[in-house]
Amino acid sequence: MSERRPPDLTELVGDDVPEAELANLRRVDSLLRSVPAPPELPDRLAAPVRHESRPSRLWTPRRSLAAVALAAAVAALAFGLGAWIAGGNSFDERYAVEMSGTFEAPAASAVVRLGEPDEDGNRPIRLEATGLEPLPEGGYYVLWLEKDGEYAGTCGTFAVGAGDAEAEWTVSYDFTDYDAWVVSARVPGDEPADAPRILEAEISF
Amino acid sequence: MALLAMATEDDAALIQRTGLGDRDAFEELYRRFARPVLGMAIRQLGDSGRAEDATQETFTAIWRSARSYRPERGTASAWLYAVARHAIIDRARQRVEPAAEAPDEPSRDLGPDEHAELSWLAWRVHSALQRLPERERAVLELAYWSGLSQSEIASYLDVPLGTVKTRTRAGLARLAGLLEEVRR
C-alpha cells in the first residue's frame, strides 16, 4: 500500500461544494483516513464455501415429528418405569422449553424442564442436554437467565462426560423478569464475561 | 428475488432469510462482509493464510447460526461482527505461539481498548463501502488507499477528472448515510 496521503477533501470533491454538505463529507473523509485499506479477496475467497446442509437441520418438521413421537414413547416408558420403581415420585413437570445450539455448538440441544414451585416459591428445574463437548479439566457449563443481553441469574452448573448431561437444581427466580435461557461454557483462565454462549432459548410465558 | 432489490435489502433481513436457508441472501451477506471479515482477521492474526481460514469459518458460522439472530437485541452489523470475532479468536487459540499483532499502520502502539475501537470502526467503514455502487467504491478506494492522485485515478479508470470528483462526492455522501444507518 502506498505511503502517499490522499489529497485534501476539497481537492477530492471539488471546491464548489456547499459548506453544509462539505461538513457532512468531512466526517466521512476523516473516518476513511483513520482506517486501513480493506483487503482484496484472494481467489480462494471469491465465493462462499458451499454448505450442503441447511441451518436448523436439527429441528426440521420431519425430524420434529419423529422426535415428538420418539419423545412421547420414551416419556411414556420412562413414566411407567419411574412410577413402578419410585412409586410415582417423578419430576412434576409444569413447563418445558427447548434450547438450541448457537454457532459455537450447532449440533447441541437441550430441554429445560420446570417443576411445580413449593409454597415458598422454590421451583425445581431440570436440564437435559445432548451434543455438548466435554470441557478441559476444571471447565464447566453454566445455565443462566439472561436479561438485556447480560448473564443475569445463575441456575446452576454442570459437567459433561460423553456428550449428554442431566442436572437438577432448585431456583426461586421469577422467570418473567428475564429474556432468555443461556448455557455458557466456562473454561479455566478465561474471563467469565467471555464465556461463549453454547445453547439458548427465549423465555416466553 | 431480483439482484437489485436484494442489493438494497438491509442486513437484518438478509440474516433472517439466511436463517431460513436462503442461499441467495447468504451470498449477498458474503458479498457485503467477506472483505471486512478478512480485514479484521488479518489485523488480529497477522497471517493471511490463517485469516482466510478464519473468514471461511466465520461464514460457516453465519450460515449455521443465522436463525439465532434476534433483531431486537442489536444491529445486524454488530451481530455479524460478534460472529466474526468469535471465529477469529477460535482460530487464534489454535496456534501454538502467541498471536501476532497486526502490521497495519493505524494499529501501531495502540492499547486493547483503542485496538478494539479501531477494529469496530474499520468493520463499519469497510462494510459500508461494500454497499456502495461499484463505480463509487472503486474511486474512493483508489483515492484513499492507492496513493494515486485524482488525475492518475482518472487516467487509470479512463474517465474525465470531473467524473472522478463527482463519483467521489456522491460516494462520500452515500457512505455518510450508510454509516449513520449502521449506528442506529
Image (spheres, coloured by chain):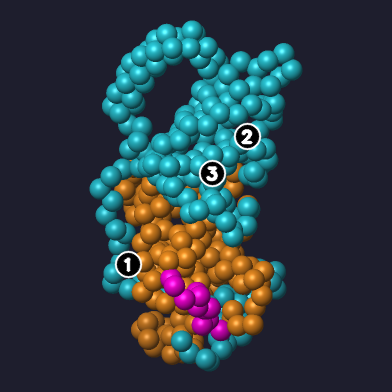
Chain ID at mark 3: A
Left or right, residue B62 beside residue B177 = left
Q: Which residue is mark 2?
A: A155
Q: Amino acid at mark 1?
A: Leu
Characterize the magenta stretch by its predominant secondary structure: loop
Q: Which residue is mark 3?
A: A141
Residue A74 visible in the current orientation: yes
Residue B89 - label: none
Q: Judging from the image, what is the letter of the chain drawn in orange?
A: B
Residue in the image at 58% along x and 19% along y: A115
Vertical relation: A69 (above or below) A176: above
Q: Is residue A93 magenta?
A: no
Chain ID at mark 2: A
Q: Residue B65 placed where, x, y %? A: 43, 46
Q: Amino acid at mark 3?
A: Tyr
Q: Residue B57 placed where, x, y %? A: 38, 59
